């Protein structure tokens, strides 16, 4: 998965878009209606890459549940701590019961940690730079669109894990 959020903060982010790609390549991309404040950096770098076809939070939850199904797959994201908090917030999961209703397995997988375990100098390089290092083509103009980022993540994941 990849998600873009309104503002980077430690106590739970608000997802404004989310992209999910299954191992078989099926994709779900949603932009979520968000009325709160959007960070200046996000306005400059993320908002121009949205298609502005927004769904409500309720609709997003329904569509994600339908797409993911009932098998409780792992969700993999790059520096997933923020994304996972965003998912918990989107699903209004406030306790163990709430988290158990999220369609993903409750242990989210951090792709940054996987890269770290492979000796990649994470933190110094952006994921697009890392992807280029592994001969995965990326486009600078499209970066920070959740679907584009999730496609890169999936390719990189397959390259590294395969
Ligand atoms: Mg992204």
Image (cartoon, helix red, strand yellow):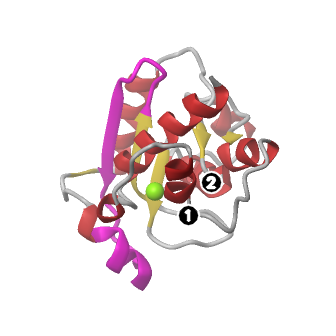
Few, some or many residues within 10 Å of mark 2 (<14, 14–19, 20+)? some
- Whether residue 102 is visible here, answered yes or no, is no
Residue 31 sits inside the magenta stretch: yes
Bounds of the magenta segment: 21-47
Dot 2 falls on a residue whose secondary structure is helix
Q: Quadrant of the C terminus?
A: top right
Residue 15 sits inside the magenta stretch: no
Pointer 2: what residue? 85
Circle nearer the N terminus (2, 1)? 1
Dot 1 falls on a residue whose secondary structure is loop
Image spot of residue 99 (x, y percent): 66, 38
Q: Judge whether 112 appears above or below 37 on screen.
A: above
Image spot of residue 143 (x, y percent): 38, 60
- Residue visible at 55% across and 53% down? 89
Q: Judge whether 23 appears above or below 156 on screen.
A: above
- Whether residue 95 is visible here, answered yes or no, is yes
Pointer 1: what residue? 13
Dot 2 and dot 1 residues touching (CB under 8 Å): yes
């Amino acid at each position: 998965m990849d998600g873009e959020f309104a503002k980077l903060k430690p106590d739970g982010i608000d997802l404004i878009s989310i992209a999910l790609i299954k191992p078989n390549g099926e994709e779900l991309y949603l932009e979520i209606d968000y009325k709160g404040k959007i960070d200046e950096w996000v306005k400059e770098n993320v908002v121009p890459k949205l298609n502005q076809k927004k769904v409500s939070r309720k609709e997003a939850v329904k569509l994600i549940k339908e797409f993911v199904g009932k098998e409780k797959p792992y969700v993999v994201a790059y520096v997933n701590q923020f994304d996972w908090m965003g998912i918990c917030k989107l699903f209004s999961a406030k306790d163990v019961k709430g988290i158990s209703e999220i369609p993903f397995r409750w242990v989210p997988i951090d792709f940054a940690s996987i890269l770290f375990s492979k000796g990649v100098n994470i933190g110094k390089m952006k994921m697009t730079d890392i992807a280029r290092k592994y001969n995965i083509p990326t486009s600078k103009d499209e970066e920070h669109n959740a679907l584009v980022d999730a496609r890169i993540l999936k390719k990189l994941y397959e390259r590294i894990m395969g």
